[in-house]
Amino acid sequence: MIFLYDDYLSAPMSLPLEEMAALHREMAEEVGSDSDALELYENLTAAATKYMFFRSNWFLWDREQRADKDPDRTSCHDMVIVRLNQLARYLKTQGKAASWREVLGQEADNPYFRKRMGDFACYLALVNGLAAR
C-alpha cells in the first residue's frame, strides 16, 4: 500500500506541514539558547525519534509484530507527551507563552489530540533526519 501526504491531511485533526513548521519555529524561538530548555528540547526530540521508528514501521509489520510492539509504541508515545508537557511547563516558568502546546491539544479534551501530538513528534524526527544529511 502506498500512502500520500494527502491521505494524512484527510485524517481527523491532522496538522499540515506548514502548521507544524510554524509551531516548531515558535518552539525553537522560545527555547533559544537557554541551556535548560535546550536539554528539555533534546529529550523531546530523542523521544520523538524513538516514537517515529514505531509509527513509520507500523504498516510494514504483520499483525503479530504489531501486537508484540504495541506496548513499546504506546510507551514511546506517552513519553513524547510527557516531554512536550515538560518543555511547555518550563518555558512558561520562564515567561514564554508556549502556545504551541495548546495547539497540539490535550488528550482529555479529544482523543485525536493524542494522534496530533504523535504527528508532531514525527515531524520533529523528520526535521532532524533531514538536517543530518
Image: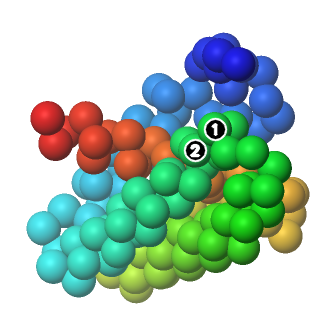
Above or below residue 43? Residue 110 is above
Q: Position of residue 25 (x, y in %)?
A: 33, 44
Q: Is residue 9 left or right of residue 36?
A: right
The answer, for residue 52, to whether it is visible in the render is: yes
Residue visible at 13% across and 67% down in the picture: 33
Say which element carries label 2. helix
Is 58 on the left or on the right of 87, as rendered? right
Number of the label disc, if any, that sits on residue 57: 2
Q: Position of residue 89 (x, y in %)?
A: 48, 80
The mark found on residue 93 in the picture is none
Disc 1 versus disc 2: distance between alpha carbons? Answer: 5 Å
Quarter of the view holding residue 132? top left
Q: Quadrant of the C terminus?
A: top left
- Above/below status of 129 relative to 80: above
Task: Name the residue type under label 2.
Answer: Asn
Residue 86 as seen in the image, left or right of residue 2:
left
Residue 18 percent across, percent down from the top left:
47, 26
Left or right: where does residue 56 sit relative to residue 29?
right
Q: Are marks 1 and 2 in contact (CB under 8 Å)?
A: yes
Query: Which sits in the foreground, 73 or 98?
Result: 73
Q: Position of residue 102 (x, y in %)?
A: 63, 59
Q: Quadrant of residue 56?
A: top right
Residue closer to the observer: 88 or 78: 78
User: Relative to 57, does residue 110 appear above or below in the rendering?
Assistant: below
Residue position for label 1? 60
- Label 1 sits on a secondary structure element that is helix
- What amino acid does circle 1 point to? Leu
Give the residue at x 63% y 38%: 60
Q: Is residue 24 above or below residue 16?
A: below
